[in-house]
Amino acid sequence: MKRNIIVANWKSNKTESEAKIWLDGFNIGGQEFAGKEVIICPSFTLLPMVSSEVKSQKLGIKVGAQNISRFGGGAYTGEVSAKQVREFADFVIIGHSERRKNFAENEEIINEKIAQAIENKLTPIICVSSLEQAKAIKEVVENNFPFIVAYEPLFAIGTGVADTPENADKMATNIKNVLGRTPVLYGGSVISGNVNSFTSMSGIDGVLVGKASLDPLEFAEIIKNA
Ligand code: PGA
């Protein structure tokens, strides 16, 4: 069955007090999601506070991290392991193009991170910008449901120029042909004004939202229109 999953990727934004303001702002309308699954992914520093506020304010949304260590726990200074993240989150974004580009994350590292997530029962949201990148994760995800894939073309991330819904739908279908019947999201310059053109496509199971998720009212509008 087609899903409608809306993921907020806050990237390296928001202090604790700014995140509290976001949560209060988001809660104002007493959001009704009706079958939509909402996941917010803040920085590591915010995970404990956000996960506890989401529960106490009964926001009805899930929490994800933006990254995990490729290693298990132990002598890896500065890293945060999947097991540590699992205390506060149900999901983790892996393989975002910003990590592939700025932190030299290659297919080997990405596959190690996916394996860590699966082992620790974190559902990975794996970002790919091409069919080749989808093929490169096939072995590690095979028969390891649940996992989510986000198709994010490089030209559309943070540019204000989204892909066409038709092309995103075609890519989502191609990705499912490679990886099996798993949810595939579209990401790249999604806003409240274009979200429905993507979520109404038969092959697309939701969206991953960067910049437009930083404003709680715009994000609420995206959920409403999705
Ligand atoms: P954007 O980012 O919505 O700001 O384009 C999407 C992403 O990087 O996941």
Image (cartoon, rainbow, N blue to C red):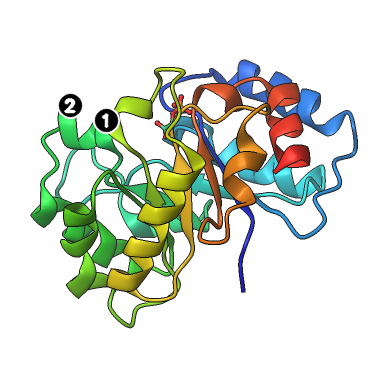
Q: Quadrant of residue 154?
A: top left
| 73 vs 121, nearest the viewer | 121
Quadrant (top left, top right, bottom left, bottom right) of the N terminus: bottom right
Question: 76 or 212, which lies in front?
Answer: 212
Residue 102 tag number: 2
Instruction: Point out the quarter of the image occupied by ligand 1.
Output: top left
> Measuring 82% from the left and 56% from the top, which residue is drawn there?
34
Say few, some or many: other residues with alpha carbon within 10 Å of mark 1 (under 14 / 14 to 19 / 20 or more): few
Q: At x 40% / y 41%, what residue is drawn?
A: 66
Q: Amino acid at mark 1?
A: Glu
Give the number of the disc on residue 106: none
For residue 89, side relative to residue 32 (left or right): left
User: For the residue with label 2, is its CB less than 8 Å from the closest atom of ligand 1?
Assistant: no
Q: Is residue 86 above or below residue 154?
A: below
Location of residue 195 by image quarter: top right
Up-down relation of residue 189 to residue 91 (above or below): above
Residue under the point 75% across and 32% down: 220
Looking at the rendered image, the quarter that the C terminus falls into is top right
Q: Which residue is mark 1?
A: 98
Residue furthest to the front:
166
Amino acid type, callout 2: Asn
Mark 1 residue CB less than 8 A from any atom of ligand 1: yes
Percent across and percent down for residue 163 are 42, 34
Q: Is residue 40 left or right of residue 119?
A: right
Other-residue count near label 2 (Cα within 10 Å), few / some / many at <14 / 14–19 / ≥20? few
Secondary element under disc 2, as helix, strand or loop, is helix
Callout 1–callout 2 Cβ contact below 8 Å: yes
- The percent coordinates of residue 76 (x first, y second) are 16, 46
- Measured in 3D between alpha carbons, the distance from the residue under mark 1 to the one under mark 2, in whole angstroms, is 6 Å
Q: Residue at x 46, y 18 (%)?
A: 160
Query: On screen, 104 above or below 7?
Result: above
- The percent position of residue 141, horizontal first and vertical second, equals 28, 72
